[in-house]
Amino acid sequence: MILFACARDASLSEIQKYGLRFSGLGHKLYRTLAGATRDCGGKILAVELEKADLAGCTIKDTTVLAPQVRLSSFRNLNPYLPLVDVVAGGGLVVKQVKRKNKVIVIHRRGVWDLPKGKRDNGESIETCARREVCEELGIDEATIVSRAGETLHGYTRSRSYQIKTTHWFWMTTGATRFTPQAEEQIEKVIWMSWGDAKKKLAYPVLRDLLKGLNPSQALAQN
C-alpha cells in the first residue's frame, strides 16, 4: 500500500537518517496524494507499507496512523524527489469460453502485463482507457461494461517520483485478430485464463487487483 507523509523542511534531514521513529500517538499518513497535498505545508514523502507493517496501524477512511515508518519504506527520500501525479486508464478485456473466464494480457519487455496508458490532456478517463486498449492491442473497438477498480503504484523518472493512479474498466471486444503495438515494445497479445493471469502477471499490484474481482459478474452485465 502506498501512503503519503508530510515532511516539513526542518524535519526532512532527520527522516532521511532515521525514518519516522516510534511515536505513541502515531504518525499520520494520507491514503491519497490529493489529501496530503491539501494538508501538508512542506515536502510530501511516498511510503510503501507491506501487510505486516499495517498490522500495528490504525486504518481510517482517509488516513493511516502508523507508530513508526522504517527508512526502507520511503520511496522518494534519499535523495528527495518531488512527487508527480499521473493518471492512467486501462482495460480488463474479458470473455467466457466453455464457462471459463479469460482476460486479454500483453507481453511487454519480457513480462506479462495488462493494457493501459496515461491520460491525454482534456481526455475523459473512459476515453483514455478505451483508446489505450485499442492502441496496445491493435484493434478498432472495445466496449466498456463498467468500472472495475483502481491501482496505485510509484516509480522514479526524470528526477521525480511518479505516483500513477490507474482506473480500470471491464471491457469486451469482438476483435479476433490483434496487432501488438511495437512502439510500446509489446510482443504478444493473448487470451489467458483468469486463474493463470492472477499468477503470471508480473506486478503484484495487478495480481492483487485480479484476486479481488469476479469477471463473471462483469460479463453478466454485458
Image (spheres, helix red, strand yellow):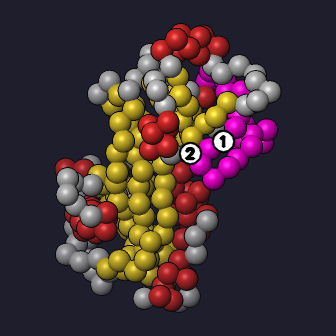
Q: Which residue is mark 1?
A: 64
Q: Amino acid at mark 1?
A: Val
Front residue of 216 and 178: 216
Q: Which residue is mark 2?
A: 31
What residue appears at the point 73 percent right and 31 percent down from the top-left corner?
Answer: 26
Q: Is residue 75 above or below residue 217?
A: above
What residue appears at the point 79 percent right and 38 percent down from the top-left corner?
Answer: 56
Residue 171, picture quadrant: bottom left
Residue 177: within the magenta? no
Q: Is residue 34 above or below residue 180?
A: above
Q: Position of residue 121 (x, y in %)?
A: 20, 53
- Note whether residue 194 is visible: yes
51 sits left or right of 166 in the view = right
Q: CA distance from mark 2 to mark 1?
A: 7 Å
Q: Secondary structure at mark 2?
A: loop
What residue appears at the point 35 percent right and 77 percent down from the top-left corner?
Answer: 144
Q: Is residue 47 above or below residue 119?
A: above
Front residue of 41 and 83: 41
Q: Amino acid at mark 2?
A: Arg
Front residue of 26 and 17: 26
Q: Secondary structure at mark 1?
A: strand
Tell me the quarter of the image containing the C terminus.
Answer: bottom left
Q: Which residues are magenta?
A: 51-72
Q: Position of residue 155 (x, y in %)?
A: 42, 35
Front residue of 109 and 54: 54
Marks 2 and 1, the one that precedes in the sequence = 2
Q: Is the residue marked by circle 1 packed among few (<14), some (14-19), or many (20+) residues within 10 Å?
A: many
Q: Are marks 2 and 1 in contact (CB under 8 Å)?
A: yes
Q: Is the residue marked by circle 2 packed among few (<14), some (14-19), or many (20+) residues within 10 Å?
A: some
